[in-house]
Image (cartoon, rainbow, N blue to C red):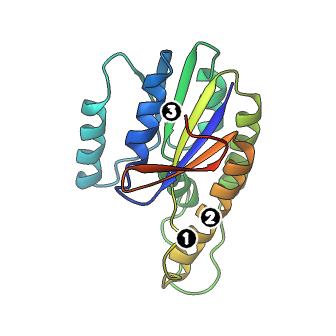
Amino acid sequence: MSTTLVLGGARSGKSAYAEKLASASGRAVVYIATARAGDSEMAQRIAHHRASRPAHWTTVEETTALAAAIDAWALPDAVVLVDCLTLWLSNLLFSGADSFPDTGPVTLPPLFYAQRQALIDALARARGDVILVSNEVGMGIVPMGAVSRAFVDEQGRLNQAVAAACDRAVFVAAGLPLALKGSLC
């Protein structure tokens, strides 16, 4: 059993790299999709991703209970590919909230803390390989607005926690992988 975190910016090639790793394993691939269609543009993106995945891959759509999905699907004869932690984090941060203040402290929902820890615990007990895709959002300026800053902070903390729990971490830029932890596959 091995765990790999694949990080990168938007359109960096991180998902394609993760899919290549999953395919190269020669095992059954379980693709856990975390996206939620909040508008028509996102619905089109989701439809495009569904259509581009190999038909023989199993797709599981899970927007919040990611640890439970990993527990159910990370089996010795399969590779679980989670795409992506960034959308999952958004789903958790905005669970149960109609809106956040533009200024002042942002109170994160209890579901976020419970699910974040459950994910780290699930990675430790996974019975098969797990590949997780996540955006690296902390390489730019500090964003304006309390909600944006809270998101960037929590994405950075999540990436650090997942990288610490994984055997490998790979950063992808311009489609090129760079090993951060462990070796390239």
Could you tell whether 86 is left or right of 71 in the image? Answer: left
| C-alpha span from label 1 to label 2 | 7 Å
Percent coordinates x, y for residue 156 in the rendering: 62, 64
Task: Look at mark 3 in the image and give the residue it sits on.
Answer: 81
Tell me what residue is drawn at x 76 percent, y 34 percent: 124
Give me the disc on residue 138: 1
Q: Is residue 100 above or below residue 73?
A: below
Q: Are marks 1 and 2 in contact (CB under 8 Å)?
A: yes
Q: Is residue 44 above or below residue 174?
A: above
Which one is in front, 100 or 28? 28
Tell me what residue is drawn at x 24 percent, y 31 percent: 51
Could you tell whether 178 is left or right of 15 in the image? Answer: right
| C-alpha span from label 1 to label 3 | 23 Å
Which one is in front, 182 or 31? 182
Tell me what residue is drawn at x 42 percent, y 40 percent: 17
Percent coordinates x, y for residue 35 in the rendering: 41, 45
Task: Look at mark 2 in the image and give the residue it sits on.
Answer: 156
What's the amino acid at mark 2?
A: Gly
What's the amino acid at mark 3?
A: Leu
Percent coordinates x, y for residue 63 in the rendering: 50, 42
Tell me what residue is drawn at x 41 percent, y 43 percent: 15
Q: Earlier in the sequence, mark 1 or mark 3?
A: 3
| Label 3 SS | strand
Could you tell whether 73 is left or right of 177 in the image? Answer: right
